[in-house]
Image (cartoon, grey):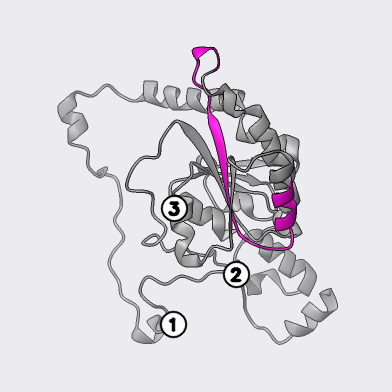
Amino acid sequence: MNKVLQFILADVSQAICVSHTSKENTVLRSGLPPEKVFVIPNAVNTAMFRPASEKLSQDEIVIVVISRLVYRKGADLLVEVIPKVCHLFPNNSLYMNSIPQDLVRFIVGGDGPKRVRLEEMREKNSLQDRVEMLGAVPHARVQSVLISGHIFLNSSLTEAFCIAILEAASCGLLTVSTRVGASHQVLLDDMIVLAEPDPSDMMKKLYNWHDVAKRTEIVYDRALGCPNQNLIDRLSWGPAEDIEEAPDFSLPNSQCSGFKEGGSLRSR
């Protein structure tokens, strides 16, 4: 395969990859000089992928999965993780000992050869009311599915970029993802929780109170470190004085002709 790639790219003068991981793989496999390979990440249409207008109910936690149900996308990991999460938070624990507990549901969108395994898992564990299988989701409906949940779960075994977690973050979801490929390069650390592609580690990252406490403590420390301000000062927030504004500029028409308003380059 590397020989084929080297032959295909032999006449290439410049190349673009969507992530630094993708660039490293391309340089190693094709023999292209690193200075000829540039990294330009995918973009997301934030006009389409936006958060819900109303706050979701806090009576349950909804975990969303939208993916092709194939081996490379970690469908077999989902078969193992979903029953464990549901077992950890059974339906009858909602008000156990008068202490509210999180009721967890899954929404799985996507189709593929591994869909049969997920449906068998749902039947075997009697999770028909906890795991909703949507089948293939048209791109125009992806946003409406994403905003139905609190957490986006990506279980891929390999990723060049994973635009799906970028779309989920744009819709306001916290992302839990396997630490593979370039998944760690897409979002800021406080927007994603990374786990090894192993069911036990994914379980820890999905529901780990030590992690929750640690992250909450960081927020409290930041709040305590903020200077005291009266209400008038708080209401008069504005841009900092030391922010340097970039000058306006325009590109020649010849350089803009390849772009459409509101468009984005996508790679799945």
C-alpha span from label 3 to label 2 = 25 Å
In the image: residue 74, left or right of residue 246: right
Q: Is residue 107 magenta?
A: yes
Q: Could you tell which of marks 3 and 2 lies nearer the N-terminus?
A: 2
Q: Nearer the viewer, mark 3 or mark 1?
A: 3
Residue type, mark 2 in image:
Phe
Q: Is residue 234 magenta?
A: no
Where is residue 79? Give x, y as percent. 73, 46
C-alpha span from label 1 to label 2 = 18 Å
Q: Could you tell which of marks 1 and 2 lies nearer the N-terminus?
A: 2
Which residue is found at the position 77% from the left and 74% from the top? Answer: 30
Residue linked to disc 3: 170
Residue linked to disc 1: 258
Residue type, mark 3 in image:
Ser
Quadrant of the image containing the C terminus: bottom right
Where is residue 95? Give x, y as percent. 51, 19
Tag of residue 38: 2
In what element is the residue under mark 3? helix
Q: Is residue 120 above or below residue 38?
A: above
- Magenta stretch: give its range: 96-120
In what element is the residue under mark 2? strand
Query: 114 or 224, which is in the foreground?
Result: 114
Which residue is found at the position 42% from the left and 58% from the top? Answer: 49
Which residue is found at the position 73% from the left and 75% from the top? Answer: 32
Query: 210 or 220, which is in the foreground?
Result: 210
Do the numbered discs 1 and 2 sit on residues whose CB atoms are within 8 Å?
no
C-alpha span from label 3 to label 1 = 25 Å
Query: 67 or 35, which is in the foreground?
Result: 67
Residue type, mark 1 in image:
Gly
Where is residue 8? Give x, y as percent. 75, 84
Q: Could you tell which of marks 3 and 1 lies nearer the N-terminus?
A: 3
